[in-house]
Amino acid sequence: MGKVIASRLARLVATLLAVTFLTFSMTALLPGDPVNAILGVEAVRDPEVVAKIRADLGLDDPFFLRYANWLKDAATGDLGQSYITDQDVLTTITQRLPVTAQLAFMAIVMALILAIPIGVLGAYKQGKWQDSSTSAGVQIALSIPNFIVGIFLIWLFSVRLGWLPASNWNRITTEGLIQNLKTAILPASALAMTQMAIFSRLVRSDMIATLQEDYILAARSKGLSDRFILLRHALRPSSLSLMTIVGINFGALLGGTVIIEYLFAIPGVGFRLINAIFQRDIIVIQGITVFIATAYVVINTIVDLLYAVVDPRIRKG
Amino acid sequence: MEHTDLDNRLPEFPRDRLSNVSASVTTGVDVAPKKATFQEVVSSMPLRVKFASLWIVVVVVGAIYAKIDTSWLGGSLPLQDPNFQTNGFDRATGSFGTGEPIEGMSAAHWLGTDAIARDTFARLVHGGWVSLVVVVVSAACGVIIGGFLGSLVGFVRGRTETVIMATVDVILAFPALVLLLALVSIFEVRNLFVISTVIGVLSIPAYTRVARANALAISSRQFVTAARAIGTKPSRILFREVIPNVLPTLLAYAMVAAAFVVVVEGSLSFLGLSVQLPTPTWGNMINQARRDIKLNVAQVIWPSLALSITVLSLNQVGDFFQQRRAVKGSNL
Amino acid sequence: MGVTAMRRKSLYRAVALLAAAGLIAGACGGSDDSAPADTSEETSEEAAAEEPAVEAGDEAEGDVDTAIEEEESAVNYGGSISVGVEAEATGLRPWEDTCSSPCYNMMIAVYDKLMEQDVNGAYTPYLAESITPNEDFTVWTMTLRSGVTFHNGVELTAQTIADMFLIQQAGAAGSSTVSAANLVSVEATGDLEVTYTLSQGGSAFPASLSRAALGMVFEPAAAAADSEGYSMAPIGTGPFVIDSRDLDNETTFVRNDSYWATDPDGNALPYLDSISFRPIPDEGTRLDALLSGTVNAMQTLRQGTIRDARAARDDDGAAITLYEFQGNNVGGGMFNTAVPPFDDVRVRRALVLMNSQEQVIEALGGTGISLPGTQWFSPDSVWWSEKVAEAWPQFDFEAGVETLTEYVNDPERSDGKAVGEPIDAELSCPPDPTLIASMQVLEQAYTASGLVNVTMTNYDQQTHINNALGMDNGFIGSHQVHCWRWGDDADPSVPLNPALAPPTAEVAEAIGLPGVVSPLNFPNWFSPTAFQAAVAATKTDDFATRYGLYEAIMLEIADQVPVYYSGHTATAIATESNIFGLNSWHVPSGELGIGFPNAEGRWSEVFIAS
């Protein structure tokens, strides 16, 4: 077990190094002088500012030294500072992370609430109309990009019906949970749809496999009720793989909410990333990209480790 | 259960389908698989897959037709200019002729017109071109480069494998859309070449992984070990035995990946970060029509439908071919 | 990292900031300050009414009229409003952050300006009590209002203004205004007396003191101590005090209980308990937010949104009031006259003749909202000239084709192509859907002529400005036909002087003014007569003389067409119909203020009717 953890952690460190290196290389890929790209028009203004930024970024140092210095700063939480808003990048991220995390969390929960019954029903009634109609629905849900879902949710619930606000974010801390949910429900729904489709497909196929196992057949022959068998014996083995994909997708959603945050003007990490891209705020793009990738890799490793703890086959080796 | 194999996780790329892919080569008798005829394939399709294939064919033909010069047909199959005001330009007033902005459906404009009176149907058909190019380039990059790399390292193993797969892991460690956004933001000029190349390059790792998994399995099968035993050159085995057997699985995966690529390109277009205007794409049509959604929601619906139906169709066809590979593998 | 503090004055300082202002304006049409409000749709004489009539008409509330006038509803204390704005302010530091309409709306809640404009567009003291020039307009003596304190309790004195100047000089936004105004020193010559010294006389100097960068009064000690922190927690003397700032979500200000100003009846201001601003970038969503009550007011710089808001009010009976304003600036673009074939006036003239302003405005969604432009001033401006309007080439496609054919068939054509070959033209706008729609109208017309190979590009704003600025090719730029916005609601000298100065060192040398280079001459068009007229206009405060000079400049522009126009900026603030006061705030003299220029509200006298 200790060996598994050690090897997973070693891989984590290696991956993180590579991820940071790749992100850092972005500045090297920039056409022309990075100072121009970073400062834009301001670069013409003041040789002193240019010199300061060259020094800050160590642009006259060899590339690998620059990377090492940047990594050292990043490891201590210094991802640099936006030259457009003067804001510290890490502060920006930590302020916005709760919003994005809440959206991702809500999307996953909403997706699970729908996906498990749908998946179980599909597996139990495999091949019957209940299965084919839910499968068709799931296929459709899987195929509509989330920004399209978002646009039509706004159009229906905000423009036509006027039930829910079309944008913005009420913080739980200042406006309370109800107001918060009012602003969170539409974007979370838009995100939840794809997740629901992925989860229910997984539940269905897992359960179909499990239902053919000997012990299920044995339980059936003992006359146990279908509902008992489904929930007690069949769902539980499936839940392991379901939890794995939930964990991974939560990590992926931290970066996957970008378009929905942009569409709904939600002050999360993704919205900041899009704004930074429109402003060509390279330092912020770099910081957020490396943060999202790191979060994703770390969450994956945690899921791996938990999985190894739970599943004896992997624990062995 | 195959999806519990954590090495086979493909972040963002449609990872829940991969179970089928690798399953296809894990069972079966060890002879090189035989090819099915076109008719056999088509007749084994369920109805929905037939419809899906038909839609894809229609989009592809439409996109290509839109791109070629059709004047030699004598205008018998007219498609209006997607970037030009309808019914010509009125030189006296500089106006849109008889076409009105944001028109409803009519005989002259089957799906109406957009905010500057361009024919929505024509833009929709032309919009397929960008998606088509991006899909083809990404599949080509994936199948050719990713497929070769994956087959190679799955066959020869060793340090090459460690290095290449580590690189693949790193690239797959980024959420795809975030990496893509970061990369396109670097380019000042974003044309079709840049966009499809970036998406193409980012597609390589996922294909490499699929190819490797299959090459690993194939390399251990009897027809390959037999070839080794009789002293066939490794390069010959790679090109004659391994790659041809990896290829069908890769092509099946390409269909599923295509659905993902279409969504990604649509997302970029929607954000205004894909090809330059006025080139129509479904994503930028949605974005532009969104401004007038109160006046005419239909102009948002048409490109949304085109995008969603295409993704749905690619998923259907992709699933069909993946399952087919799986079934064939187990039946052999 | 202290970059801000390190900034020093430099030669090109002016460039970036004004460029940035032009760019932001170019994309969305806002800028500081303004002239009298008017939204009448006809350019005829009837529109020249003193108090511009703004079409209002909310039946539910009776005769609500958004013309600037004394409010008749009884004022009411208390309540909070939330305002949807189109973008988050990059910062709230007047000396540092280049500001368009959204951020101005927030800053004006916290900061008072030294000068304001009254309903007639005249500059009048606000936080200042008086200001007087010397004979040649090089020395201006200002007296401050007494007994004013900042939100942190510090008292406002002449020394405050002098200390502010040190920060403004080094600030990104301030430095350009300082150099544009030729301001060299600011001294405290008494407890409340401040003396401004200019290197060249400028009769329009009070206009500079009504601009955010130079006119908004901030607390210099706190600003110097922590510039970045100040952006999040600004300190001014204004009617509201910052309460919380949640970036990209909500910025809230609460009532300043010890605000110095009162309404004309002597009641304490402001009326509202608090006001908050929420950035909602999407135009449609922002309007939806108002209609669904998510916000109580919203700001827009887009004709299409004004059109939708009017429809919501008139057709759907939404209880909203629309405060529309026609900006004293004009959208459109420019030709880079340093680049063939745009160095040939025939090409420029042809492209202008083929440009149907009516269709462009239609594409912008501004038909019946935005007036076609013929000069840098709107028909409501005191500077507007009938003569120039007649001189501007009106749409005539065939004439355009004829003119361009002449160039194309000229064996000596400047772009070096073979006779008969179409010219190449690259059209470029920032990637805003509205601007892109308007650009495509041009593209269609040019393509229809068969004489132009059009390509279209969209770069983000930074790159768009950079391309026009051309810092890597001697400020010539890589642009050809480039979306831009012309004019400014400040005094004409503010936008015109830098735009008419020699664009490159070579030109400056050739006319014997080495060193007088303005990178802000984006079209690279230089006319000695126009430049001299612009300089002469800053040496006098006689209106008739100045009017004549500016008219001459505009006539020359109409003849040489280095720029082209679409429509004047239409802007609006829309509020729920029980919110009053945007059109009825006062300057300290008791006169009505300018209103709501460029969708920039003054919030101190806004109240919610009971």
Image (cartoon, grey):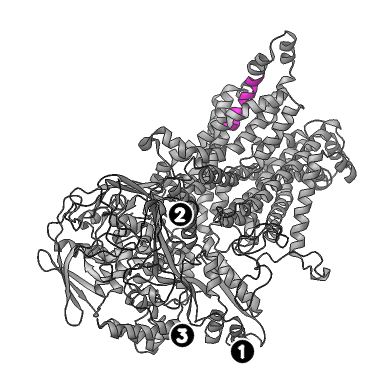
Question: Splitting the image into 4 quarters, where does residue B94 fall?
Answer: bottom right
Q: Foreground: A287 or C355?
A: C355
Q: Foreground: C259 or C310?
A: C310
Question: Splitting the image into 4 quarters, where does residue C92 fall?
Answer: bottom left
Earlier sequence position, callout 1 versus callout 2: 2
Asked whether the residues under the numbered discs 3 and 2 touch, taking CB atoms below 8 Å apart as contact, a structural biologist would say no
Measured Cα–Cα span from mark 1 to mark 2: 51 Å
Q: Secondary structure at mark 2?
A: helix
In magenta segment, residue B206: no
Earlier sequence position, callout 3 versus callout 1: 3
* Residue at image location 60% in from the left, 32% down from the top: A245
Q: Are marks 3 and 1 on the same chain?
A: yes
Q: Of tags 3 and 2, which is closer to the observer?
A: 2
Q: What crowding class fits label 2: few (fewer than 14 Cα within 10 Å), some (14-19), or many (20 or more)? A: many
Disc number for residue C451: none
Measured Cα–Cα span from mark 3 to mark 1: 22 Å
For disc 2, the marked residue is C313
Asked whether the residues under the numbered discs 3 and 1 touch, taking CB atoms below 8 Å apart as contact, a structural biologist would say no
For disc 3, the marked residue is C391
Figure quadrant of the C terminus of chain A: top right
Q: Amino acid at mark 1?
A: Glu
Question: Splitting the image into 4 quarters, where does residue A36 fall?
Answer: bottom left
Secondary structure of the magenta portion, mostly? helix
- Range of residues picked out in magenta: A234-246
Q: Are marks 1 and 2 on the same chain?
A: yes
For disc 1, the marked residue is C406
x, y percent for residue C428? 54, 69
Figure quadrant of the N terminus of chain A: top right
| Residue C458 located left or right of residue B40 | left
* Residue at image location 76% in from the left, 43% down from the top: B317
